[in-house]
Amino acid sequence: MSAQPIQEEIEQRLASAQPEVEVLLAEVVGDTVRLYIDHPDGVTLALCEQVTHDLAEIRERYALEVSSPGNRRPLTKPDHFRRYLGRRATVRTRERHDDRRSFTGELVGASDDEVTIAADTGVVTVAYADIHRSNLIEE
């Protein structure tokens, strides 16, 4: 699953301004960029305000919403999937995969190229490139 160009741009800008901030997901919705971030010390309103300030160039082109991931943390990179092995997640695919487009279950494997989910219909492996969206679910 490759990052969108806006996510790559934001990651590059924050790498120097806020190196401890992890960009979980940046998505363009209409004329707004929704940005989900994480930080080792947690995400505060002050941090969201600072990140908004640091992304002035993005705000020239889009409205910007910066927030914490909450309980439905987005999973967008192999490291995210590896970090949460053993947790339950929903993975939605771009195209039908095993005659379905959505799988919910325990994350049981995550390589550099694909994630394995123990879903209700059995164990399924999905390439990151085929994932449309994925997130943890509350337990």
Image: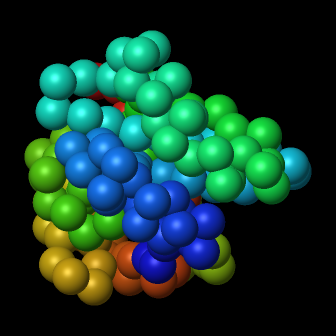
Residue at image point 25% right, 23% down: 42
Q: Is residue 13 left or right of residue 139?
A: right
- Which part of the image, by quadrant, shows the N terminus? bottom left
Q: Name the residue rendered at 20%, 63% in the picture.
A: 79
Q: Residue at x 86, y 49 (%)?
A: 31
Quadrant of the rendered structure where residue 87 is?
top left
Choose top left, top right, bottom left or bottom right for residue 18.
top left
Residue 101 sits above or below residue 125 on the image: above
Instruction: Answer whether residue 52 is visible to the viewer in this image.
Output: yes
Q: Is residue 25 left or right of residue 111?
A: right
In this view, the residue in front, 60 or 128, is 60
Query: In the shown orientation, is residue 110 left or right of residue 113?
Result: left
| Residue 123 seen from this side | no
Q: Is residue 102 above or below residue 51?
A: below
Q: Is residue 40 above or below residue 97?
A: above
Q: In the image, residue 118 lies at what x, y percent?
A: 25, 58
Q: Residue 129's spot in the image, x, y percent?
A: 47, 83
In x, y percent, where is residue 101?
59, 66
Task: Please say if 131 is above or below 41.
Answer: below
> Residue lying furthest top in this view?
45
Percent position of residue 130, x then y: 51, 80
How many numbered discs, if any? 0
Quarter of the C terminus within the rendering: top left
